[in-house]
């Protein structure tokens, strides 16, 4: 409890110090600017009155800082800085900045720890795990079936069932690379996509305009379809599930089908068809609701 109080008091003292420095900087800024046009005919008198008010604020902030500092507890023993205490005795010019570098490294590591905690919280909310292993489970599991060696006929059946579910999305299957399927998707007259499979697991996706030549490696010449390709890779990773591959493929195809209104439905956040800065239509689709958003509006 005492440590919490000391930290709060120290933060209050630092805040008072920043306020004092800001008010002093304002005084010097006013002095450097001198008389301004808005002072009018009685510019000298108004300038002196303004300067007097600023100096009064400095005086008030100084008193607040003194009161806050006087309330800080006096340390009973010197702070233990470890080996960093010897840095002040360093005479080499190149090594005198080591302490600042150490402080910056500490701040960087602290931020890494904070951001990794946030990332762990967000990733743990995803129910589709990318690993077979659950460290919190103590039950003996049966051997899971691998989905990297599924028969091509089973892959065709899954994709054909998805194809029959949509009237405005045509899915065709080819196998230019041995037994692994390459799926071409024609979504109405809006876009075309190609998805490379490793058995039942999606490995690559490329989205292009309806009039463009479709292949796996060349990006679209249109910015909007390059943005859709980026979002499709994010969706492919989001729906990835080695234990439920059919559900992953069906979920991804459902998400991709939501782009049928790419150029007709406005953003759910700002209500505009084109964003005022990027001048792009809503190229992002929510993974759960499939609602359209601009990249700038999805946060």
Image: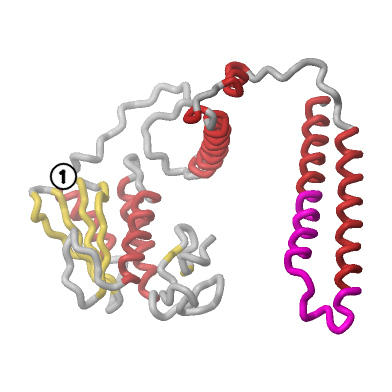
Residue identifier under label 1: 151
Residue at 81%, 21% (x, y): give it.
Answer: 75
Please state the horizontal and vertical placement of residue 216, each as a whole percent of the image: 18, 59
Residue at 25%, 36% (x, y): give it.
Answer: 146
Rendered view: 28 above or below 16: below
Q: Give the range drawn in magenta.
A: 19-45
Of the pair 36 and 296, the residue shown nearer to us: 36
Please state the horizontal and vertical placement of residue 141, each as a whole percent of the image: 38, 25
Please state the horizontal and vertical placement of residue 37, each as a whole percent of the image: 77, 80
- In the displayed structure, does residue 75 sit left or right of residue 156? right
Q: Does the magenta stretch include residue 28?
A: yes
Of the pair 239 and 282, the residue shown nearer to us: 282
Of the pair 282 and 245, the residue shown nearer to us: 282
Residue at 16%, 53% (x, y): give it.
Answer: 181
Callout 1: helix, strand or loop? loop
Of the pair 90 and 223, the residue shown nearer to us: 90
């Amino acid at each position: 409890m005492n440590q919490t109080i000391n930290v709060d008091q120290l933060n209050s003292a630092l805040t008072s110090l920043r306020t004092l420095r800001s008010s002093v900087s304002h005084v010097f800024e006013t002095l450097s600017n001198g008389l301004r046009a808005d002072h009018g005919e009685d510019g000298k008198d108004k300038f002196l009155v303004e300067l007097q008010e600023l100096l009064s604020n400095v005086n008030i902030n100084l008193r607040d800082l003194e009161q806050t500092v006087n309330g800080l507890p006096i340390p009973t023993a010197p702070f233990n800085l470890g080996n960093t205490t010897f840095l002040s005795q360093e005479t080499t010019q190149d090594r005198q900045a080591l302490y600042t570098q150490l402080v910056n490294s500490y701040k960087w590591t602290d931020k890494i720890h904070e951001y990794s905690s946030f990332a762990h919280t967000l990733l743990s909310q995803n129910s589709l795990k990318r690993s077979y292993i659950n460290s919190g489970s103590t039950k003996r599991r049966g051997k899971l079936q691998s989905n990297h060696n599924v028969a091509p006929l089973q892959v065709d059946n899954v994709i054909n069932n998805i194809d029959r579910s949509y009237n405005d999305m045509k899915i065709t299957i080819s196998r230019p690379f041995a037994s692994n399927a390459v799926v071409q998707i024609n979504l109405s007259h809006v876009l075309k996509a190609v998805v490379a499979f490793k058995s039942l697991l999606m490995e690559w996706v490329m989205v292009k305009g309806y009039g463009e030549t479709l292949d796996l490696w060349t990006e679209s010449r249109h910015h909007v379809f390059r943005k859709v390709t980026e979002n499709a890779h994010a969706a492919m990773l989001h729906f990835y599930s080695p234990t439920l591959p059919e559900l992953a493929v069906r979920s991804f195809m459902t998400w991709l089908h939501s782009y049928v209104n790419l150029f007709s439905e406005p953003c759910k956040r700002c209500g505009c068809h084109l964003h005022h800065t990027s001048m792009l239509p809503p190229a992002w689709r929510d993974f759960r609701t499939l609602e359209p958003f601009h990249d700038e509006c999805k946060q």
